[in-house]
């Protein structure tokens, strides 16, 4: 069974995502809403990671092949200015989307295994990911015109 | 009409009692105050108006003698105040007359503000405006207004910004004040618009005040409550406030409760109250299933908030929470009011929505005594929300609804693309950030004083002082903010211009011009119209964009804009408001006398094509899309919005061990530009103070009157200590004391020196009520 591979992937992507939210939050301290929301969402992703523990215990996890590639997709550092903020939020959007589809794949396996606990977990956490994506989209839509047109 | 001078209203803030029974009409009492030496018979004429010095908007007549305002008298036929006036209305509305007003425009020359003519001043503004439009486009322009202008002025400014320039950067100090009120109503009911009415005080048997120190913020409304409390069948009062205020005392005396949660924990408390209603089966299930959406999610979210858990988070007795919920759950007619203790605090919109939820769960909206009043700070503030001079589109239209944008474009005869609607209009905190970053380079500030009222003043001063930011300040006085301006425009004030405004319970009043403004000062409307004319804004047919010249014409234009919307003014007119007194919108052909309560039929403004907003995630502020909204099929049902409690962004720790909370007090209004110049009010509260709990003061070695320094990571104030009745661990600072009247003494005293640049994710209202500080005695 290869579920362990995807649980490993999920685990790594959640950890990377939480770190990335923290990093963007800290890096854009002068945008208080960005800082606050990023830290809030990072905390909630930590909770997802904890909730994953009993599932990982049940099916195991295989994390050997993925971490490096995921790290590369994560953030090296934050950028400055209005466009920099947009780019950082867009990176978060990409990482969050990656987690979103990973949950979907794991959810499909949960259906096949008729694992009710895992299904509940997936359902809750897909809502969490949707919240991340919604906020990121909202904030980017707000920032884009000013950053691309008026900023000097 | 017989108007007797009333007793001194400085010490006797709420006046003598006129008790009445539940369901009866609040007795009339005419309060008046005339300048010393002026008798009633000396008055040349009485001019109809209403007071703008708190959200009540008490109807009054202005006494005029020899072309000067010499007093005021409450209008006893009015539904808002039944003739009463508070200390600010009596002593603060007109007594600044004639002293240090701005009478000529000022322009900055060689670093100094010098007098100039209107042509020169407006020429400078138009030149800079045009340059920036050519170079960078409309996103370079920002407008930061007041909650003190009239409806006609807000609407005109909204058209200039949204249809003339096409900038989304318009907001006002209403963001600091009523933004959460509007946001919570949009989230729960689909649109701004107050469901309840002041008359609900006459009918209720339980009254809940959430973060609302009504005794100091709306003295006349509090008189109404005191009169109910003094009469037969008084209501039980429950108060949520970290301070033991007069309101809290009255609550305890009424057999109710005072809950004093730690600042920043309101959402935990509210989740606890909602949970108690649910677990004790005090929910009107028929109402909830017929008229609401979201109950399962709400139930799940509040499930962990047991009284014990809430008690721990909020630092309150769990039994008190249970008792409060029991009062709410068993009373037949509950009225709730909400104000800054919730709005300017952490999770503001979420907590205000939970008040709406309590009412929805009990089916207690839109009937006598069963109402919600999401309050404002000033009557005129409601008009920014309606008219589109703040972060909303005019007429409660939805920026995400192309149909609504098209309606505006047709009304104004412009291309819909001109109206910025790619995201919500920019909120104040973001406008200041863009100015800080240099992408907004033209900032027009009217009738407000951000150098005292905005959070984190050291930052605001830095922004205002930026060389590449062109600042226009339009005001009646040379304020702290005016000192930073490139151009200062002298504006007429209340009583010196004509217009209408709308208070917290949707009552529209006409305020007539009583006297001429001093010198060359002009009505704000005339200033905006002058700018529009000089900028030559035109519609699609090449005609002037703004076709009105007088307040009454502007009002008619607004009536067309509001027609068919929830805030329908089409049935009103200056003629109808004149002589009569106060009419509540919606007022149209079918409802010519106005509407006392909204949503009596349980049908809310949540249809996807009608609502003002599709809603937000209360934790992050992420917006719900039109498609998601439609899929929920709200169709007139209200939303039971839910959110877990999260800890506030700044909590006390080792370096800053206290929570600082700030607020208004009874003798001053806003940044004291007017009230600080009214001798009686000024004498009553000449300077700010820091209120400490007795135990904390003892530990710090501070006694009453000692000078203390209260300091956060951002800045500090040095003010005398008062041993007060805040809960231990909390410091209270009255805010909006600035620097113009310090007599040269230079110690910092504006509470906003230390408040933080943080805001609620949904309403974008800044968090003035929490912040970690330290306190020490200043030696010498």
Image (cartoon, helix red, strand yellow):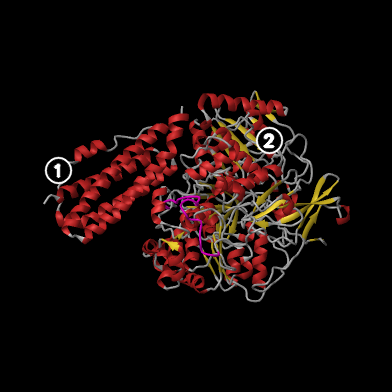
Q: Position of residue B387 (x, y in %)?
A: 59, 45
Q: Which mark is residue A64?
A: 1
Circle 2 residues within 10 Å: few <14, some 14–19, many ≥20: many
Q: Residues within 10 Å of mark 1 (few under 14, many from 20)?
A: few
Q: Residue at x 62, y 34 (%)?
A: B545
Bounds of the magenta span? Answer: B600-618
Residue B83, label in figure = none
Residue B617 lies, in percent from the top left, at 41, 51
Name the residue rendered at 35%, 36% in the picture. Answer: A88
Tell which of B628 and B60 is nearer to you. B628
For discs 2 and 1, the disc positioned in front in the rendered view: 2
Classify mark 2: helix, strand or loop: helix
* B22 sits to left or right of B468: right
Q: Is B180 on the left or on the right of B549, as rendered?
A: left
Q: Residue furthest bottom?
A: B232
Residue to which mark 2 is pinned: B527
Q: Quadrant of residue A63?
A: top left
Quadrant of the rendering where the N terminus of chain B is positioned: bottom right
Q: Chain of mark 1?
A: A
* Res B700 visible: no
């Amino acid at each position: 069974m290869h579920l362990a591979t995807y649980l490993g992937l999920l685990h790594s992507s959640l950890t990377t995502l939480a770190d990335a939210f923290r990093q963007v939050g800290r890096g854009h301290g002068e945008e208080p809403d960005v800082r606050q929301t990023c830290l809030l969402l990072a905390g909630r992703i930590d909770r997802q990671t904890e909730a994953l523990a009993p599932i990982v215990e049940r099916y195991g996890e295989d994390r050997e092949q993925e971490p490096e590639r995921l790290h590369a997709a994560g953030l090296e550092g934050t950028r400055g200015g209005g466009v920099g903020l947009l780019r950082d939020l867009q990176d978060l959007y990409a990482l969050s989307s990656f987690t979103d589809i990973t949950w979907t794949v794991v959810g499909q396996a949960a259906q096949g295994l008729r694992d009710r606990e895992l299904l509940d977990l997936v359902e809750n956490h897909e809502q969490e990911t949707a919240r991340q994506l919604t906020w990121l989209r909202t904030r980017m839509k707000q920032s884009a015109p000013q950053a691309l047109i008026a900023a000097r | 009409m017989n108007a007797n001078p009333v007793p001194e209203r400085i010490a006797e803030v709420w006046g003598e009692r006129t008790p009445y029974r539940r369901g009866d009409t609040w007795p009339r009492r005419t309060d008046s105050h005339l300048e010393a030496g002026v008798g009633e018979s000396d008055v040349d004429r009485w001019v109809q108006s209403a007071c703008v010095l708190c959200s009540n908007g008490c109807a009054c007549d202005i006494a005029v003698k020899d072309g000067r305002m010499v007093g005021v008298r409450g209008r006893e036929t009015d539904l808002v105040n039944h003739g009463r006036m508070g200390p600010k209305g009596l002593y603060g509305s007109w007594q600044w007359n004639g002293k240090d007003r701005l009478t000529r425009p000022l322009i900055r020359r060689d670093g100094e503000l010098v007098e100039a003519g209107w042509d020169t001043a407006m020429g400078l503004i138009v030149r800079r405006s045009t340059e920036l439009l050519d170079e960078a486009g409309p996103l370079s322009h920002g407008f930061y207004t007041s909650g003190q202008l009239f409806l006609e002025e807000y609407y005109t400014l909204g058209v200039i910004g949204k249809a003339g320039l096409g900038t989304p950067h318009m907001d006002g100090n209403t963001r600091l004040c009523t933004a959460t009120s509007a946001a919570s109503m949009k989230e729960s009911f689909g649109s701004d618009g107050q469901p309840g009415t002041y008359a609900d005080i006459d009918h209720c048997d339980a009254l809940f005040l959430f973060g609302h120190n009504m005794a100091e913020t709306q003295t006349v409304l509090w008189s109404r409550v005191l009169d109910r409390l003094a009469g037969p069948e008084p209501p039980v009062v429950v108060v949520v406030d970290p301070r033991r205020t007069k309101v809290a005392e009255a609550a305890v005396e009424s057999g109710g409760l005072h809950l004093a949660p730690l600042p920043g924990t309101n959402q935990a408390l509210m989740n606890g109250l909602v949970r108690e209603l649910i677990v004790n089966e005090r929910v009107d299930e028929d109402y909830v299933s017929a008229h609401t959406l979201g109950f399962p999610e709400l139930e799940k979210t509040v499930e962990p908030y047991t009284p014990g858990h809430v008690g721990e988070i909020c630092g309150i007795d769990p039994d008190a929470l249970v008792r409060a919920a029991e009062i709410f759950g068993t009373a037949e007619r509950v009225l709730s009011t909400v104000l800054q203790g919730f709005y300017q605090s952490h999770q503001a919109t979420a907590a205000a929505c939970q008040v709406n939820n309590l009412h929805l769960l009990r089916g207690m909206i839109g009937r006598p005594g069963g109402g919600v009043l999401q309050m404002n700070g000033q009557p005129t503030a409601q008009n920014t929300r309606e008219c589109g001079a703040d972060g909303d589109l005019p007429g409660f239209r939805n920026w995400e609804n192309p149909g609504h944008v098209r309606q505006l474009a047709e009304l104004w005869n412009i291309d819909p693309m001109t109206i910025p609607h790619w995201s919500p209009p920019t909120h104040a905190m973001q406008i200041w950030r863009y100015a800080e970053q240099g992408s907004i380079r033209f900032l027009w500030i009217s009738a407000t004083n951000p150098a005292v009222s905005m959070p984190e003043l050291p930052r605001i001063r830095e922004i205002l002082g930026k060389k590449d930011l062109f600042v226009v300040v339009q005001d009646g006085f040379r304020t702290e903010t005016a000192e930073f301006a490139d151009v200062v425009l002298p504006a007429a004030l209340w009583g010196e211009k004509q217009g209408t405004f709308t208070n917290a319970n949707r009552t529209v009043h006409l305020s007539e011009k009583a006297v001429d403004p001093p010198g060359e000062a002009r009505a704000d409307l005339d200033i905006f119209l002058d700018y529009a004319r000089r900028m030559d804004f035109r519609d699609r047919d090449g005609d002037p964009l703004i076709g009105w010249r007088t307040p009454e014409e502007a009002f008619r234009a607004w009536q067309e804009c509001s027609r068919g919307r929830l805030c329908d003014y089409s049935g009103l007119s200056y003629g109808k408001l004149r002589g009569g007194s106060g009419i509540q919108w919606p007022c149209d052909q079918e409802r010519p006398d106005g509407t006392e309560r909204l949503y009596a039929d349980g049908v809310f403004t949540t249809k996807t094509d009608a609502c003002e907003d599709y809603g937000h995630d209360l934790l992050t502020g992420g917006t719900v899309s039109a498609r998601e909204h439609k899929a929920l099929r709200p169709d007139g049902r209200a939303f039971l919005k839910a959110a877990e409690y999260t800890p506030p962004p700044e909590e006390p720790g080792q370096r800053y061990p206290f929570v600082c909370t700030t607020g208004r007090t009874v003798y001053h209004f806003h940044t004291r530009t007017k009230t600080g110049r009214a001798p009686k009010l000024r004498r009553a509260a000449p300077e700010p103070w820091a209120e400490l709990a007795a135990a904390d003061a003892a530990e710090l070695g501070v006694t009453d009157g000692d000078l203390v320094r209260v300091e956060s990571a951002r800045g500090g104030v040095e003010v005398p200590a008062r041993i007060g009745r805040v809960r231990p661990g909390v410091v209270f600072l009255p805010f909006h004391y600035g620097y113009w009247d310090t007599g040269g003494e230079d110690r910092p005293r504006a509470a906003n020196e230390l408040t933080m640049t943080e805001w609620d994710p949904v309403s974008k209202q800044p968090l003035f009520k929490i912040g970690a500080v330290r306190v020490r005695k200043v030696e010498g």
